[in-house]
Image (cartoon, grey):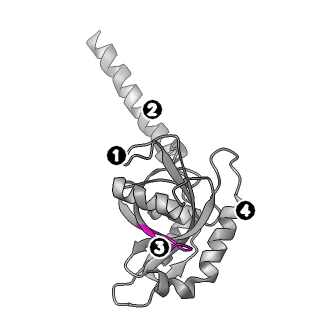
Amino acid sequence: MHKRLLIYLLIFSLSASFFACLFPYPIFSSYTNVTDKNMVEIANLKESEISVEYDDEIKVLAIDWDIANAILECYTPYRLIDIKSGISIMIERIGGKNHADIETIDNNNTMLLYEIYDNNLSWDRRPAYLEYSDNVYFCCSLSGFPHGESKGENSLNGHLCLHFKNSKTHGSNQIDKTHQNNIKYAYKYKYKIQDII
């Protein structure tokens, strides 16, 4: 009986190993798959445009969502700057597959979010810059109505949506024209970022 059980376990282990080699993890992941082309773009981006170790020049980039999705870490604080008001808030990504789901990091930053929206949080899309690292900013578009899952203690009762170039909404799975226009606006006026930050 023990021999038979050991044989079954051995067969199962070998089968599972073989299956895992044929179908690696990313196929099963709900996380957006990153293609070889994306990996080359990410590597090039990190080596050139995002690398600011010896460069004081401010870089404003309109990066594709596939790249943003791969490099923006969850539960890491980022500075988000609303272009039109000039108000900065600290946010963190809590997830998101088609775009970044974000939250303010605390109640103080929630109050600043209310200032951005004139004390009336709404679905209005607003052009913004996300500070990725010193002197590197990504063009993005914020939708400021809290909804769905919430993980922070920030009085929001939901998360917000942050869109990047070619990102999509969760509901329609479509690229949102207003968000994309905001990203173009942010990139067009990137020369003014020094006045905002």
Kindly check if marks 3 and 1 are in contact, taking CB atoms under 8 A apart as contact.
no
Mark 1 surroundings within 10 Å by alpha-carbon count, few (fewer than 14), some (14 through 19), many (20 or more): few
Determine whether, in the image, residue 9 is placed left or right of residue 157: left
Residue at disc 3, secondary structure = helix
71 over 172 or under it: above or below? below
The circle drawn on residue 177 is 4
Residue ID for mark 2: 15
Lower position in the chain sequence, tag 1 or tag 4: 1
Residue 36 visible within the image: no
Residue 4 visible within the image: yes
In whole angstroms, how far apart are the C-alphas of marks 3 and 1?
35 Å
Residue ID for mark 3: 43
User: What amino acid is found at the position of numbered circle 4 in the picture?
Assistant: Lys
Mark 2 vs mark 4: in front: 4
Residue at disc 1, secondary structure = loop
Kindly check if marks 3 and 4 are in contact, taking CB atoms under 8 A apart as contact.
no
Say whether residue 83 is magenta.
Answer: yes
**Which x, y percent locates residue 153?**
34, 46
Mark 3 surroundings within 10 Å by alpha-carbon count, few (fewer than 14), some (14 through 19), many (20 or more): few
User: What amino acid is found at the position of numbered circle 1 in the picture?
Assistant: Glu
- Quarter of the image for residue 186 reads bottom right
Part of the protein shown in magenta: 79-88
Determine whether, in the image, residue 49 is placed left or right of residue 6: right
Lower position in the chain sequence, tag 3 or tag 1: 3
In whole angstroms, how far apart are the C-alphas of marks 3 and 2?
35 Å
In whole angstroms, how far apart are the C-alphas of marks 1 and 2?
45 Å
- Quarter of the image for residue 4 reads top left
In whole angstroms, how far apart are the C-alphas of marks 1 and 4?
32 Å
User: What amino acid is found at the position of numbered circle 2 in the picture?
Assistant: Ser
Lower position in the chain sequence, tag 3 or tag 4: 3
Residue ID for mark 1: 153
